[in-house]
Image: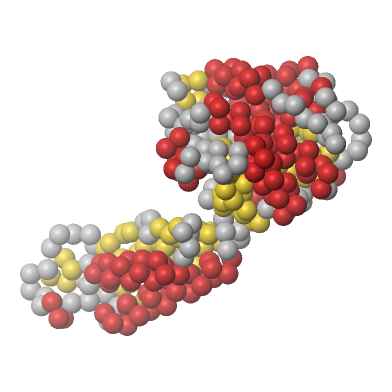
């Protein structure tokens, strides 16, 4: 059986260095194709080359480090760009794991591993732009048209920004055919592992999203002269709806289902006028598509009941919808076995509540994800952190998982 002996200290030292590129206080600012992002990618290219990997930077700025030989291999990585002001681990920890695994595999007799850092995962231009184009989810022309969301005036487009890819390393194209599977290590960005003192999470699926915009229309009227029984108060309808929805979802949902009444606009929003209309969003997220269907049905049925009971008119408009993305079972089981061997009793199977590059890559390659805990569940924030021993444990678990995967595939 091939072996893979990883060096967690080497990975941690590289993370410490990467943190200095774009550092702002305890956080990091490396927007896609900013000076700091290009510098970090160039530094990654140097480490990949000195590890004996062949580097190819594609036209999106995705950086690939490929082991010698033509046989298809595992691909491990994530992204090295950040939110406008992000934490020091979001994305880059997965790239650092990929680099360490690819290097350790070459040093020993481990299975061949390639590493990737996808570009613009954090949406300076599009959303998960680099992995969207690479997986065929988005055309290059569509990506090129995306404008810089950070700019207040005269935004540049992705087409212009990606000219900087040539500053990062040797340009070329990397076909997904070169890989047998994709594994994305990522910090959890939520509180579940931290709260349960878990060391490792094995992702079962990346959750899907359903969203509706609902509007109750009643009658705006004088708040002093309109008797209570004669009112058609849209905001009171919203309040009744929120209570009824929470009750219904509490019995329908499982412990990981989440829903949010995130945006509420009352009209005319004045102290002395009975509210005539209220428009609000209801968003539901879960890993189970069937449950999302039932929740969406319940959300609109309750709105109809509230509108009928209160003499309101209901306008219900479906909003954005993303299907859940299940992870590959064979890869998942390899990670579960590795976790049971490395951190017995301190791991769990869990959904990912956030979107990742894995959401795109799962369309074209068997895909799995492994989580490390986030202290306090904090992410997209300079306070984002994970204990160093947990980063090391998750890397070692992944190292064993990769060996098991290469036997299973
Ligand atoms: Zn991320």
Judged from this view, the residue extending furthest toward the right is 70
- Location of residue 240 by image quarter: bottom left
| Applied colour scheme | secondary structure
Task: Say how many tags the image has.
Answer: 0
Residue 262: give x, y in percent of width and height.
Answer: 38, 56
Q: Is residue 326 above or below residue 42?
A: below
Q: Is residue 217 visible?
A: yes
- Location of residue 180 by image quarter: top right
Q: Is residue 224 above or below residue 350?
A: below
- Location of residue 345 by image quarter: top right
x 69%, y 49%: residue: 332
x 37%, y 59%: residue: 261
Quick one: 336 or 206, which is closer to the camera?
336
x 51%, y 34%: residue: 83
Q: Is residue 190 visible?
A: no
x 7%, y 74%: residue: 225
Quadrant in the picture for the N terminus: top right
Quick one: 264 or 217, which is closer to the camera?
264
Quick one: 224 or 152, which is closer to the camera?
224
Judged from this view, the residue extending furthest toward the left is 224
Residue 116: give x, y in percent of width and height.
Answer: 72, 34
Residue 277: give x, y in percent of width and height.
Answer: 29, 68
* Left or right of 199, for residue 301: left
Residue 161: give x, y in percent of width and height.
Answer: 64, 31
């Amino acid at each position: 059986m091939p072996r893979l002996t990883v060096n967690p200290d080497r990975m941690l030292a590289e993370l410490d260095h990467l943190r200095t590129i774009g550092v702002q206080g305890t956080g990091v600012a490396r927007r896609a194709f900013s000076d700091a992002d290009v510098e970090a990618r160039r530094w990654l290219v140097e480490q990949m080359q000195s590890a004996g990997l062949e580097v190819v930077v594609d036209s999106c700025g995705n950086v690939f480090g490929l082991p010698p030989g033509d046989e298809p291999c595992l691909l491990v990585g994530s992204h090295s760009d950040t939110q406008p002001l992000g934490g020091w681990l979001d994305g880059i920890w997965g790239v650092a794991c990929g680099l360490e695994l690819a290097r350790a595999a070459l040093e020993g007799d481990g299975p061949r591993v390639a590493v990737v850092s996808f570009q613009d995962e954090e949406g300076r231009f599009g959303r998960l732009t680099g992995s969207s184009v690479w997986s065929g989810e988005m055309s290059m022309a569509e990506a090129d048209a995306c404008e810089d969301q950070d700019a207040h005036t005269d935004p540049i487009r992705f087409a212009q920004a990606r000219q900087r890819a040539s500053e990062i390393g040797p340009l070329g194209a990397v076909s997904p055919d070169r890989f047998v599977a994709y594994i994305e290590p990522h910090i959890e960005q939520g509180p579940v592992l931290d709260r349960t003192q878990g060391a490792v999470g094995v992702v079962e699926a990346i959750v899907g999203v359903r969203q509706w915009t609902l509007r109750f229309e009643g009658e705006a009227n004088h708040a002093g002269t309109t008797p209570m029984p004669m009112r058609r108060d849209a905001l009171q309808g919203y309040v009744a709806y929120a209570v009824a929805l929470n009750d219904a979802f509490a019995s329908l949902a499982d412990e990981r289902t989440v829903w949010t009444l995130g945006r509420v606009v009352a009209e005319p929003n004045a102290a002395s006028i009975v509210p005539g209309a209220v428009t609000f969003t209801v968003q539901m997220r879960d890993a189970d598509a069937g449950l999302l269907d039932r929740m969406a049905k319940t959300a609109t049925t309750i709105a109809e009941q509230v509108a009928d009971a209160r003499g309101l008119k209901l306008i219900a408009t479906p909003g954005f919808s993303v299907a859940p993305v299940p992870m590959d079972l064979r890869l998942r089981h390899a990670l579960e076995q590795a976790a049971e061997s490395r951190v017995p009793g301190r791991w769990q199977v869990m959904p990912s509540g956030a979107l990742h590059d894995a959401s795109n890559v799962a369309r074209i390659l068997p895909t799995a994800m492994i989580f490390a805990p986030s202290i306090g569940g904090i992410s997209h924030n300079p306070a984002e952190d994970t204990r160093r021993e947990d980063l090391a444990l998750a890397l070692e678990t992944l190292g064993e998982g990769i060996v098991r995967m290469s036997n299973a595939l």
